Image: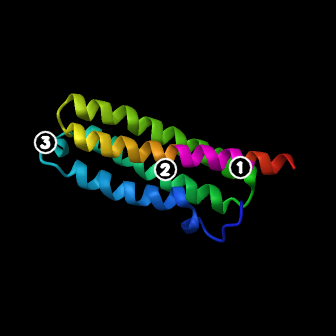
Amino acid sequence: MGKFKSFEEINSWQKSRLFNKRIYEITENTIFKKDFDLVRQIRRASISISSNIAEGFERNTDKEFVYFLYVSKASAAEIRSQLYLALDLNYISKIEFDELYLNVSDISKLLSGFIKYLNDSQKK
């Protein structure tokens, strides 16, 4: 579990919390919010990142935590794919796409590093 006392201390959770807010703001755009299915899917995937970090942390075993971090990472990939669709449909601008893509990619990299750290610590 690393040296964290709560999931709120985890950098990837903190960043995903901010990312969730940004996704909600972007999907409130008049054009975007008319696509109920995509809005619901991208929001759920975004929420899945932070929720799975929290849930995995509370499992109290590194093995289970790693599993949930992988689920979070998969949700980040899902969002990257959905961002391309939102861009292709002109729901978001290229600048918004770049911002969101960079943020979710950063979260994914943090998750990868955390997974590696936890896996390495299990081997010791």
* Residue 54 located within the stretch drawn in magenta: no
Q: Which residue lies furthest to the left in this view?
A: 30
The tag earlier along the polypeptide, 2 or 1, is 2
**Res. 56 mark:** none
The tag earlier along the polypeptide, 3 or 1, is 3
What's under tag 2, amino acid-wise?
Answer: Ile
Task: Report, in whole angstroms, how far the alpha carbon at label 2 lies from the one at label 3.
Answer: 25 Å
Decide whether the magenta segment is chiefly helix, strand or loop.
helix
What's under tag 1, amino acid-wise?
Answer: Tyr
Q: In which quarter of the image is residue 88?
A: top left
Comparing 52 with 92, the one in front is 92
Image location of residue 105, percent across then percent down: 45, 42
Instruction: Classify mark 1: residues with Cα within 10 Å, few (<14), some (14-19) or many (20+).
Output: some
| CB contact under 8 Å: marks 2 and 1 | no
**Vertical side of 67 occupied by 86: above or below:** above
Disc 1 secondary structure class: helix
Write down the residue under mark 2: 49
Q: What stretch is highlighted in magenta?
A: 109-118
| CB contact under 8 Å: marks 2 and 3 | no
What's under tag 3, amino acid-wise?
Answer: Ile
Q: Residue at x 13, y 42 (%)?
A: 31
Task: Report, in whole angstroms, how far the alpha carbon at label 2 lies from the one at label 1.
Answer: 18 Å
**Which mark is in front, 2 or 1?**
1
Disc 3 secondary structure class: loop
Instruction: Classify mark 2: residues with Cα within 10 Å, few (<14), some (14-19) or many (20+).
Output: many
Write down the residue under mark 3: 31
Image location of residue 87, percent across then percent down: 24, 33
**Res. 117 mark:** 1
Q: Residue at x 19, y 39 (%)?
A: 93
Task: Report, in whole angstroms, how far the alpha carbon at label 3 lies from the one at label 1.
Answer: 42 Å
Q: In which quarter of the image is residue 116?
A: top right
